[in-house]
Amino acid sequence: MIDELEALYRSRVQEFRRVAAAIAGDRELGCEAVQEAFAKALRRRRSHRGTGTLEAWVWRIVVNAARDARRRRPVVMESRAASSNGHAPTLPLELLTERQREIVFLHYYADLDYASIADALEISPGTVGATLTAARKTLRRAHEEVEA
Amino acid sequence: MNEILDELVPPFGRPGDWDDVLRRAARRRVRPIVLAAVVALAAVAVAPTLAGLLRHDGVGLPAEADRSNVAVVLAPLNRKVILEAAPWKGHDGFCYEVMHLRAGCVPRKTFGAVITKPPLFGWTFDDRVRSGVATMFGGRRVPLTVKHFGGRMDVTLFLVRGRLPIPHLLKSVVLRDANGKVVLRLRRP
């Protein structure tokens, strides 16, 4: 099991980090969450009973660690004023729910399919599909409003 | 959407550290109640010493900072380094470390931000900013030290001068240009 966890870490650490950083809202906190999550997975490896894949089980721990990191991070006040120096508009992720954001991040940064995302978040694949469709629609509408 | 998500969290350049994971896993876990009791006792008994130690052994500039190009802000009285900033290696942005308490890296996509946990400080990429004032709930106004770092960083950093107010009471930050005109207004969401 330790070897499998090490192989998973070495092959997918960058995807784990990007998803964790996106959820935590901070790159350093995301990296830290991944390190802590894998350490926790190592300590609790015996609790993985083989229902679902090892990767989905680890994703679950990483997502939880990143959520905790987000709760602990400092409040950041950002200006929503119109850009005066030509910066491109960013994706209005604040329009999405926490679950929608997590599904978007797992789908785009980790390239997970619906079944894997469902395993990682302990929801049904149908819910993943519906949530992703709703998230895309919200973002598309927001983008169209900015363009108009 | 893919492009914007790529920009939101750019890929990480540095490789993973499996040995660090092994070290963390091997670390003995202390029961939370025991830990809380020890921390409470230490805080009461040796608060000033502890504060001093934390300040000296705290966080440093992130590993992704370009250490060959570090700029600093010194405290006016004791000339100690209170803020360090450096370009972010491989990215468009900068990394910071403030008072050995807080550190991070920031991409050049935000208009401006304020960290409201101690120590209160923030940044903007708008190069017109020359001065700033923080307003607390209750109306107290606190002047800010504003420093512009050019070159690859091209960022303006600001932090509270003198005694720190309670950051949770921060209501807004107003940043102005050389003529006193408001450039940016940051409010608590």
Image: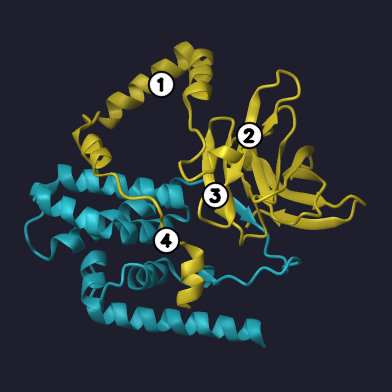
Residue highlighted by disc 4: B11
Task: Name the image quarter holding residue A43.
Answer: top left
Depth check, front residue: A113 or B117: A113
- Mark 1 and mark 4 on one chain: yes
Q: Contact, CB < 8 Å: mark 2 with mark 3?
A: no
Q: Colour of chain B?
A: yellow
Q: Earlier in the sequence, mark 2 or mark 1?
A: 1
Q: Tell me the CA gap for discs 2 and 1.
A: 29 Å
Depth check, front residue: A17 or B188: A17
The amino acid type of the residue labelled 2 equals: Leu
Q: Nearer the viewer, mark 1 or mark 3?
A: 3
Residue farthest toward the front in the current orientation of the protein: B68
Q: Secondary structure at mark 1?
A: helix
Q: Contact, CB < 8 Å: mark 1 with mark 4?
A: no
Q: Contact, CB < 8 Å: mark 2 with mark 1?
A: no
Q: Nearer the viewer, mark 2 or mark 1?
A: 2
Left or right: residue A43 compared with residue B176: left
Q: Colour of chain A?
A: cyan
**In which quadrant will I find the C terminus of chain A?**
bottom right
- Mark 3 and mark 4 on one chain: yes
Left or right: residue B38 compared with residue B109: left
